[in-house]
Amino acid sequence: GDDAPPYAAGTFTVQNLGAFGVASAAPIVHTPQACALALGAVVETLAPAPDGGFVASPKLAATLAADHRVVDGAVGAQW
């Protein structure tokens, strides 16, 4: 059998911790992958309304971690 870790053949990992109620996370990039994206839970937050008040608005935290040997940090930050 193949004893390689499940992430050994990939280049990008998506971690959906929001499915477990986690609001945000900091992903870890495993070699040989280039990036990892962590998604948090959708939570209701207050946002400014056009009329000057506030309205409930859904928010999702998405955190990208990149291996800077592969991805330019400025390009990752623009994402």
Image: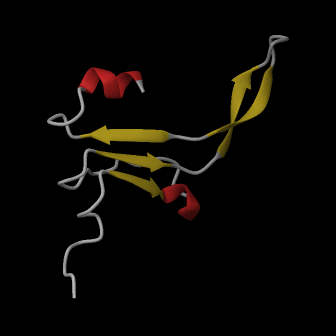
Query: Residue 48 placed where, x, y %?
Result: 73, 19
Query: Residue 23 placed where, x, y %?
Result: 53, 49
Query: Residue 31 placed where, x, y %?
Result: 17, 54
Left or right: 6 as drawn, with respect to 22: left
Residue at the extreme right of the image, as rendered: 51
Query: Residue 40 placed where, x, y %?
Result: 52, 49
Query: Is 70 situated above or below 36?
Result: above
Look at 40% across and 46% down and name the residue there: 37
Query: Is 68 situated above or below 32?
Result: above
Left or right: 42 as drawn, with respect to 7: right
- Quarter of the C terminus within the rendering: top left
Circle count: 0
- Quarter of the N terminus within the rendering: bottom left
Query: Is 53 situated above or below 59?
Result: above
Left or right: 1 as drawn, with respect to 40: left
Look at 41% across and 40% down and name the residue there: 63
Residue at the extreme left of the image, as rendered: 69
Taking depth in this image into account, of 46 and 33 the one nearest to the observer is 33
